[in-house]
Image: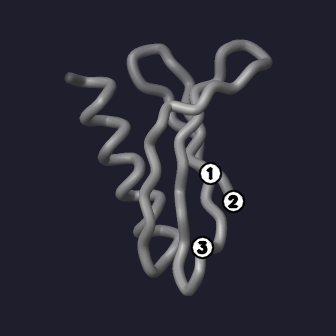
Amino acid sequence: MARQLELLGRRFWILSEPHGSGWKASVVEMKGEAQESVGIEATAETRGAADDAAERKLRRLVHS
């Protein structure tokens, strides 16, 4: 499952996958056809919570 975001003209994807008994979300930036890891990861009991945590971290990084 993935969530797409556009922040300050940049495109990001939050990718989530099962991780142990919960979920792990990671963030990649799309640069044309290529993707580059941003280095942000978050884990939580649910996919939505992991995605939300990763998005908060990304927004803090991009807006700082």
Secondary element under disc 3, as helix, strand or loop, is strand
Report which residue position mark 3 lands on: 19
The residue positioned 58% from the left and 32% from the top of the image is: 37
Horizontal and vertical percent position of residue 54: 41, 51
The residue positioned 59% from the left and 34% from the top of the image is: 28
Counting residues from the N terminus, which is met first, the one under dot 2 or under dot 1?
2
Mark 2 crowd level (few <14, some 14–19, many ≥20, 10 Å Cα): few
Report which residue position mark 1 lands on: 15
Q: CA distance from mark 1 to mark 3?
A: 12 Å
Q: Quadrant of the N terminus?
A: bottom right
Q: Are marks 2 and 1 in contact (CB under 8 Å)?
A: yes
Q: CA distance from mark 2 to mark 1?
A: 6 Å
Quadrant hosting residue 32: top right
Report which residue position mark 2 lands on: 1
Q: Quadrant of the C terminus?
A: top left
Horizontal and vertical percent position of residue 14: 56, 46
Quadrant hosting residue 19: bottom right
